[in-house]
Amino acid sequence: MPQKTDKFYYNRNFYIGLGGVIVGGILFLLLLDHVIMPAYTNYDEGVTVPNITRLSLEDAEKTLTSANLRYEVAERRSNEAFPANYVIDQDPAPAEIVKPNRKIYLTVNIVTNPTVEVPKVTDLSLRNATIQLENAGLQVGTISYESSRFKNTVLRQSVEPNKVVKKGISIDLAVSDGLGEDMVMIPEIVGLRLAEAQQKLRDAGLRIGEIRFQPSRDVAPNVILDYSPKQNRVIEGKTLMLIVSERFDTKEQDEAGAVMDSETDSTRQNNQN
């Protein structure tokens, strides 16, 4: 009989101890979730990121430090709109809410513009020339077309190769249109409407340059009156100047004094008699 009592006593102590461990674990988790972790992570605390763009790096550092934030210069690049050592971008952006002591990454303007060497792109295809210029940090500017045998080949570049220039400038290119080897007949375009004449000239491999308009009483507007040069055969790719009709506006001259209608006046006299 005493053995049963001892066994029951020990079992009760075991369950009491187990319950105490469980309750203690629950209390610890609650303490960890509501007290320890919020204190460690600054829960319910936030800092509004100030706008430090357009500030000098020195002023930006003071502003961030006073807001309990850190900073790191992540990139330096050239921007002519800002003075040297001024902040031109930031991450996170202004007005975002972040944790205290968060690091703000800055892009700072450098003192001078970087320079690059212009690559030689003549005799390359337009596509390859574009890639070469962009890889060098340059841009393709105006593209003009001239008559030459090899289509889409760069004939000239506006800045000579190997010249050192500011990074990001534009280089104009003259490109071959694949025309210029053969002689072609100028189609009969006098009397055609402008749109139809333009199509015929393009089909013949010719270019259209200046278009001059000339008033005409006898010809409808937008009809080809003449062209230059007046030749039967020209080199393929030749540019023609067109003379096109436009409406002839006549302006009536104003006459001074009253205009008498004789018929109306005589009718009035007869009525009075």
Image: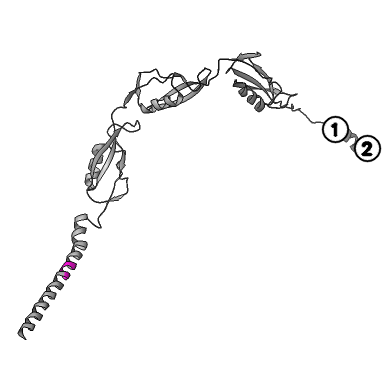
Q: Secondary structure at mark 1?
A: loop
**Residue 133 lies within the magenta run:** no
Q: Position of residue 193 (x, y in %)?
A: 69, 26
Residue displayed at 44% across by 27% down: 127
What's the amino acid at mark 1? Asp
Foreground pick, 261 / 99:
99
Q: Are marks 2 and 1 in contact (CB under 8 Å)?
A: no
Q: Which residues are magenta?
A: 22-26
Disc 2 from disc 1: Cα separation: 15 Å
Q: Position of residue 198 (x, y in %)?
A: 63, 25
167 up-or-down from 1: above or below: above
Residue displayed at 23% across by 37% down: 58
Mark closest to the chain's N terminus, 2 or 1: 1
What's the amino acid at mark 2? Asn
Q: Which mark is residue 270?
A: 2
Q: Which mark is residue 261?
A: 1
139 up-or-down from 28: above or below: above
Q: Give the left or right position of residue 162, taking residue 226 as reference.
A: left
Q: Which mark is residue 112?
A: none
Q: Position of residue 171 (x, y in %)?
A: 42, 23
The answer to which quarter of the image holds residue 273 is top right
Q: Give the left or right position of residue 65, taking residue 176 as reference.
A: left
